[in-house]
Image (cartoon, rainbow, N blue to C red):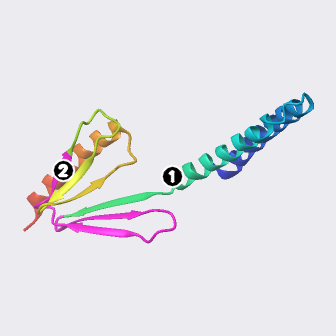
């Protein structure tokens, strides 16, 4: 969601919570007011965390001679890994589960990829990547 929409939602929640806090203050239940403020602060934190998570990026580039993985998180330098496609094995654990892992294995080392994908997307991506790796192996001299 665009930031201005999130700010509008937060503003509406703030106004509603402020109205409830004032109501409870007038009734003498002043202990409710801090929790109404905490509710807005936690919602703002959740929006910020969601926005930052949406900025994660993972690029996978496959050529006949290299499988390159580049990963970028907000406020961190980009990390890159490189594999020989001839030796890469794609493994998908528990494809129907949310916590399943899509892993690239090569020479005893591994790299988990696609962690932010939904389980169905992870299954599709694993199949596409396996097919692409097979094609790259056939065209590699």
Q: Is residue 11 within the magenta segment? A: no
Q: Nearer the viewer, residue 134 or 49?
A: 49
Quick check: 113 left or right of 107? right
Quadrant into which the C terminus falls = bottom left
Q: Tag 2, which secondary structure?
A: strand
Residue 86 percent across, percent down from the top left: 11, 61
Q: Residues within 10 Å of mark 1 (few under 14, many from 20)?
A: few
Residue 1 percent across, percent down from the top left: 61, 46
Q: Are marks 1 and 2 in contact (CB under 8 Å)?
A: no
Q: Is residue 84 within the magenta segment? A: yes
Quick check: 48 left or right of 22? left
- Distance in Å between CA atoms under marks 1 and 2: 25 Å
The total number of labels drawn is 2
Sooner in the amino-acid sequence: mark 1 or mark 2? 1
Q: Note whether 36 is above or below 138 in the view shown.
A: above
Residue at label 2? 90
Determine if residue 1 is in view.
Answer: no
Determine if residue 96 is in view.
Answer: yes
Give the image quarter of residue 69. bottom left
Q: Tag 1, which secondary structure?
A: helix
Q: Residues within 10 Å of mark 2 (few under 14, many from 20)?
A: some
Residue 4 percent across, percent down from the top left: 71, 50
Residue 32 percent across, percent down from the top left: 78, 34
Residue at label 1? 54
User: Magenta region: which residues?
Assistant: 64-91
Q: Nearer the viewer, residue 58 or 21?
A: 21
């Amino acid at each position: 969601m665009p930031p201005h929409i999130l700010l509008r939602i937060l503003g509406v929640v703030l106004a509603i919570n402020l109205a409830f806090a004032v109501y409870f203050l007038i009734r003498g239940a002043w202990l409710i007011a801090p929790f109404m403020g905490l509710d807005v602060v936690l919602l703002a934190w959740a929006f910020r965390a969601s926005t930052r998570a949406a900025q994660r990026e993972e690029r996978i580039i496959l050529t006949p001679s290299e499988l390159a993985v580049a990963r970028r998180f907000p406020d961190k330098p980009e990390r890159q890994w490189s594999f020989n496609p001839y030796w890469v094995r794609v493994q998908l654990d528990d494809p129907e589960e949310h916590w399943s892992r899509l892993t690239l294995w090569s020479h005893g080392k591994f790299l988990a990829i696609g962690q932010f994908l939904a389980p169905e997307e992870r299954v599709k991506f694993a199949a596409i990547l396996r097919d692409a790796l097979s094609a790259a192996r056939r065209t590699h001299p």
